[in-house]
Amino acid sequence: MNFERHILCIGAGYVGGPTMAVIANKCPQYKVTVVDINPDRIARWNSDELPIYEPGLEEIVKARRGKNLFFSTDVEKGIQECEIIFVSVNTPTKNFGAGAGMAADLQYWDKTARQIRECARSDKIIVEKSTLPVKTAQAMKRILTCEDNGIRFDVLSNPEFLAEGTAIRDLENPDRVLIGSSQTPNGLRARDVLVEIYANWVPRDRIITSNIWSSELSKLVANAFLAQRISSINSISALCEKADADIQEVARAVGTDSRVGSCFLNASVGFGGSCFKKDILNLVYLCRYYDLKEVADYWEGVIRINDYQKERFILKMLDALFNTLADKKVCLFGFAFKANTGDTRESPAIFVARRLLEERARVVITDPKALQNAMIDMEGESGDISYVEDPYAACEGCSAIAVMTEWQTYAGLDYERIYRSMVKPAFIFDGRNILDHQRLFEVGFNVFPVGKPGLTHF
Ligand SMILES: NC(=O)c1ccc[n+]([C@@H]2O[C@H](COP(=O)([O-])OP(=O)(O)OC[C@H]3O[C@@H](n4cnc5c(N)ncnc54)[C@H](O)[C@@H]3O)[C@@H](O)[C@H]2O)c1
């Protein structure tokens, strides 16, 4: 079949895989190839067991794979065949050298740029999908054009705003698509090509264009604002617990003000995920680089509150369980950083599990989709850890349950049965405020939500 366009995506991860699956599904006239240097990941994209879990993803991949959606390890061939390259490689926080623990590690990005330059035989539009420090497009352009090989490269910024757990819905029906380009005639022409691709399914008024630096920066700022709301409500949850107020009542009263809005006001054990912390650190690093100390300190506070919230959670457990967790079995309900994903990157559950082990507790982990990743995360940790799929079996003989992930399934369990199988007194720490606390108290549990007074029998 003759395709109208050949699109390549470098990086078959949580962003590259779903994004390209949706483009292939919405645009059968395009050939979409996703490449990755990780052969296991590609093998899984080509198998019945996809490497990531996202509601709705499997159906789309199975419908388009082999027709206009292809997964391959042949990066070179992919580069040669396509005209548009989305780059969706990982950009984690650097853990060595200058900027360690703050700056973005751009080595994968840099290597990709060099590989594109070496393999390209015709003009390409390069689309930054990864989240990057502002001005990275300039660096990319410099790498791509340092040798005059007669090939034109136009670099666009098109940050991805999908949220894991709702990625397919977000991609099919985005609040907005942002495309940043240089304002030169070539830059604007490249931008229009990308606008046309999205216009296959996204209404034009939701496709926003901007200058390229605004686009790069907007992604960092969007994540910083989202995380800031979580830290804001979590900071108030600490005050509610002292003042006998109820954080859900406060959040409702505040969030019904249309100027504030109600989203992202759920108090919890803290935010996780691969992006929020990394992107804020990146923003803080940029501000320090430009000598904006006050601005950097302001945003760093969002991370400080998140760390404080996770530590507070552990200290509350320790306090409630009579100041010793040694040898007590504690079951973590959920290990994923949020519901409807198997992703555990930066999950608060990792922190809580490690701290519990430090207190010599015996940790039992259960999760509907993230047990494999949990095992990888906890590899090498010393102490008593077990992984149990069935939540009922996981709770047997435990002194406490800690809800780490807001999986709906945990709200619907038979807590009378669970209570009977646990060591008494039995405790529940609801790190996501998803359970019926009064009901659990009546069953016999001592219940500790986030941001409200605990319900205890003594
Ligand atoms: N995960 C999210 O929810 C999300 C949302 C928006 C934006 N982002 C951003 O998107 C980018 C990718 O995130 P992700 O979660 O998909 O990461 P990921 O780690 O799941 O996937 C990245 C993939 O890139 C591959 N890769 C690295 N270098 C390569 C190279 N030179 N050639 C080919 N493949 C290479 C890796 O093997 C990996 O499979 C990051 O910058 C992230 O900040 C992520």
Image (tube, rainbow, N blue to C red):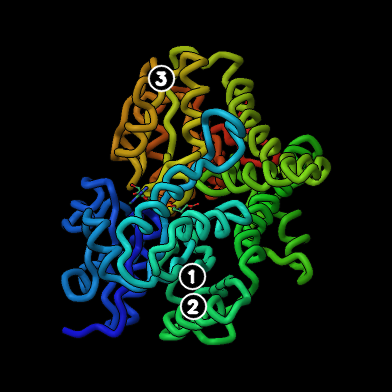
Residues at discs 1 and 2 in contact (Cβ within 8 Å): yes
Residue 174: where, in percent of width, then height?
A: 51, 74
Q: CA distance from mark 3 to mark 1?
A: 55 Å
Splitting the image into 4 quarters, where does residue 177 fall? bottom right
Q: Is residue 437 visible?
A: no
Q: Is mark 2 within 8 Å of ligand 1?
A: no
Q: Name the amino acid, label 1.
A: Asp
The structure residue drawn at horizontal position 73% and vertical position 63%, both measured from the top left corner, is 255
Point out the frontmost of discs 3 and 2. Answer: 2
Splitting the image into 4 quarters, where does residue 72 fall? bottom left
Does 31 sit left or right of 123 as displayed? left
Q: Which mark is residue 362?
A: 3
Q: Name the amino acid, label 3.
A: Arg
Q: Name the amino acid, label 2.
A: Ala
Residue 19: where, in percent of width, then height?
A: 39, 66
Does 228 sit left or right of 18 as displayed? right
- Residue under label 1: 154
Q: Which mark is residue 279?
A: none
Q: Is label 2 in a helix, a strand or a loop? A: helix
Residue 64: where, in percent of width, then height?
A: 22, 73
Q: CA distance from mark 3 to mark 2?
A: 56 Å
Q: Is residue 396 above or below residue 283?
A: above
Q: Is residue 255 above or below residue 27?
A: above
- Residue under label 2: 190
Mark earlier in primary sequence (1, 2): 1
Mark earlier in primary sequence (3, 1): 1
Q: CA distance from mark 1 to mark 2?
A: 7 Å
Residues at discs 3 and 1 in contact (Cβ within 8 Å): no
